[in-house]
Image (tube, rainbow, N blue to C red):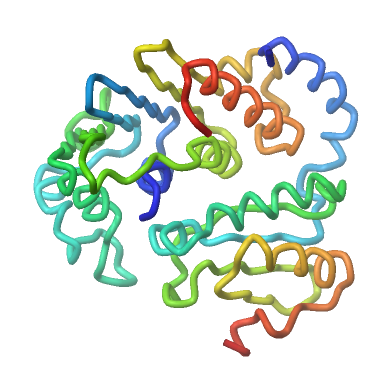
């Protein structure tokens, strides 16, 4: 059984790297989590990003955050990716499966997945 | 919404937007009913606002004129023969004791009962999105009680570690899944 006490061990392990992390992320992944997004399937998309970032050990470089409705409900789930010095990329009608490719090609490879972007939908 | 856990996520997001510092999510199964109550200490609403909540064309937003969260929840409850209830005390009128409580009751034996779905994902999504605010989650049924409290987590972690860190979210997800399995919830 998992216990609360295990958090003390996690704390010791994390202490050292936390200082580095705050505010130093280069890439921000923003998932729309208003009623429209949630109803369209944003929750698995958000969780897929969180899991992928953890799995790829990218949490110092990439932050995943949530936002409300940005007004294009028909395209939900919507994910916006902000990167310093680059134009914002808006992905639409996202799914957990599409997240994998965005992680590989865009977040890690630096090249947005054009066919998932709002311009192509 | 395909899962009640998505309604819970949606309603709890309203509490986040209301500036709450503590949000309670309490699910209870009794006989053939399932109910949940979402309470917060956010800015609350005035009486006229509460009265118009179930009207999809009423919203406090200025960007668009449709708000569907509460109407969706009302539909999900009423189609099973259940109901919803919203109580609120606005910060303006009750500066010392304000907040909102949304309660919904469902009849599980109704053919139109929406399944709970992935409640663990809902709780993890909420913790992920809300550093600096606390959640008290519980599910009580005849087999016992499952719970997760971010305050208890913070007591072990200290205040300087963000709950949204992947290591902590992974722990919370496993911990809650185990607790729910103990009280015989199918995940």
Q: Is residue B152 left or right of residue B52?
A: right
Residue at the image point whose x is 20% and y is 33% from the top: B89
Which x, y percent locates residue B28? 32, 23
As drawn, the residue found furthest toward the bottom would be A120
- Eyeballing the image, is B62 above or below B99? below
Q: Is residue A18 left or right of residue A69?
A: right
Residue at the image point whose x is 45% and y is 76% from the top: A72
Q: Is residue B157 left or right of residue A60?
A: left
Quadrant of the snapshot with the N terminus of chain B = bottom left
Query: What count of labels does the image hold?
Result: 0
- Eyeballing the image, is A60 above or below B25? below
The residue nearer to you, when weighing B35 against A74, is: B35
The residue nearer to you, when weighing B153 against B159, is: B153
Determine which quarter of the picture holds residue B151: top right
Residue at the image point whose x is 20% and y is 29% from the top: B94
Which x, y percent locates residue B33? 23, 28
Which x, y percent locates residue B128? 60, 41
Determine which quarter of the picture holds residue B131: top right
Which x, y percent locates residue A7? 73, 18
Determine which quarter of the picture holds residue B120: top right
- Eyeballing the image, is B93 above or below B68? above
The residue nearer to you, when weighing B25 against B174, is: B174
Residue at the image point whose x is 41% and y is 22% from the top: B139
- Eyeballing the image, is A38 above or below B76? below
């Amino acid at each position: 059984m998992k216990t609360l006490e295990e958090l003390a061990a996690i704390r010791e392990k994390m202490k050292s790297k936390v200082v580095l992390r705050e505010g130093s992320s280069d890439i921000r992944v923003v998932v729309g989590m208003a009623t429209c997004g949630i109803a369209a399937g944003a929750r698995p998309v958000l969780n897929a990003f969180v899991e992928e970032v953890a799995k790829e050990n990218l949490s110092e470089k990439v932050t995943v955050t949530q936002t409300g409705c940005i007004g294009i409900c028909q395209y939900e789930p919507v994910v916006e990716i902000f990167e310093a010095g680059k134009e914002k990329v808006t992905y639409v009608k996202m799914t957990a499966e599409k997240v994998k490719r965005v992680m590989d090609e865009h977040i890690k490879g630096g090249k947005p997945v054009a066919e998932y972007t709002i311009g192509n939908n | 919404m395909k899962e009640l856990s998505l309604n819970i996520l949606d309603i709890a997001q309203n509490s986040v937007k209301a500036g709450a510092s503590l949000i309670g999510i309490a699910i209870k199964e009794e006989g053939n009913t399932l109910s949940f109550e979402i309470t917060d200490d956010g800015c609350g609403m005035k009486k006229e606002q509460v009265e118009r909540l179930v009207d999809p064309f009423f919203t406090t937003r200025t960007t668009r004129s449709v708000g569907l969260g509460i109407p969706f929840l009302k539909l999900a409850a009423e189609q099973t023969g259940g109901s919803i209830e919203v109580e609120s005390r606005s910060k303006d009128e009750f500066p010392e004791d304000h907040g909102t409580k949304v309660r919904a009751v469902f009849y599980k034996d109704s053919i139109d009962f929406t399944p709970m779905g992935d409640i663990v994902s809902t709780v993890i999504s909420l913790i992920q999105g809300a550093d600096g605010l606390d959640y008290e989650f519980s599910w009580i049924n005849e087999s016992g009680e499952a719970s997760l409290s971010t305050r208890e987590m913070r007591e072990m972690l200290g205040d300087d570690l963000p709950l949204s860190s992947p290591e902590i979210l992974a722990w919370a997800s496993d911990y809650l899944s185990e607790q729910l399995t103990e009280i015989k919830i199918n995940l």
